[in-house]
Image: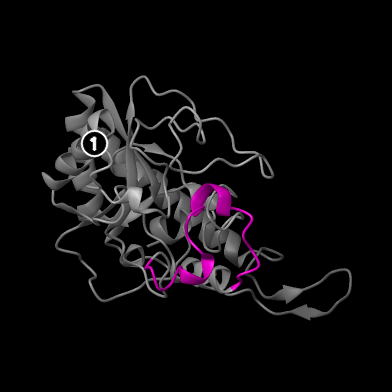
Amino acid sequence: MTRLASTLRALAAAAAALLAVTAGAPGASGATGTSEASGTSRPARPLSPMAPEEFVALRTVAPTILHDIRYLTPHNFVGVPVDGYEQPLCVLTRPAARALQRAQWTLLRQGYSLKVYDCYRPQRSVDHFVRWAKDLADEKMKTEFYPRVDKSRLFTDGYIAEKSGHSRGSTVDLTIVELPARPTRPYVPGEKLVPCYAPQGERFRDNSVDMGTGYDCFDTLSHTDDPRIKGKQRANRQLLKSTLADVGFTNLPEEWWHFTHKPELFPDTYFDFPVSWRPVIGH
């Protein structure tokens, strides 16, 4: 075992022990106790479900991969932080994480880095998407993310579904960033929105290479091989697709950013533990 691996295991064990002590401490979140002020008992808040031991945080496997976990923020098609996202973390099954590590090595030699937008996604997050999609009056992010799609057609057109492959743990949304990576400017809620398919210099300033559209763009221009995407934009998409294919990922043709590592460890299971450190290190 390398010194780094030993250190990571020691840190994980220490964090898990600290969390266990905190959960059982009087007055701690999740503990059953009596209020000193009122003398009344309060029900325990159930602890979050744990991840199977086959899940890891990507940072512990491939620490150089950049993270931009959009659903933890209001800069997404819903317009608010999404249920189930508690920390800016990418969680994946171990084979998927190790495959991304190999892809990252390939790209680093060419002056690029991977950047993940979303990885494992809890079922409660998918449920949040479904509730939002059924609320036809809530269109505050339409101008950026689905300007040419009627919200009433999000289910019919396949943009929203009641189950997501992300919840099985081997699917990831990601892009490529040229090194040295420029910072992505912070999104300001309420700012003027620009369509996600606008030229790169006009749409939201992401540090990704130009893929022809922004992330989570509900538009046919997001189809990986859309013939309208040409030149450098097409070459960037093909670089991402071919690099990931070489390590076992399959692209979803409708979304240039969406890839699933095959074979999946959990092809029929949809998990619901939150995106945070505790479910992963608390085994």
Tell me if 63 is positioned left or right of 190 in this view: left
Q: What residue sits right under mark 1 in the picture?
A: 234
Tell me if 98 is positioned left or right of 204 in this view: left
Tell me if 62 is positioned left or right of 77 in this view: left
Q: Main secondary structure of the magenta part?
A: loop
- Residue 96 at x, y percent in the picture: 23, 53
Residue at horizontal 69 percent and vertical 44 percent from the top: 190
Residue at horizontal 57 percent and vertical 49 percent from the top: 143
Q: Residues within 10 Å of mark 1 (few under 14, many from 20)?
A: some
Quadrant in the rendering for residue 236: top left
What amino acid does circle 1 point to?
A: Arg
Viewer-proximal residue among 204 and 194: 194
* Disc 1 element: helix
Residue at horizontal 59 percent and vertical 55 percent from the top: 81
- Residue 181 at x, y percent in the picture: 40, 24
- Residue 246 at x, y percent in the picture: 10, 44
Residue 87 shows in the view: no
**253 lies above or below 107:** below
Magenta range is 135-158
Furthest residue in direction left, as rendered: 246
Residue 19 shows in the view: yes
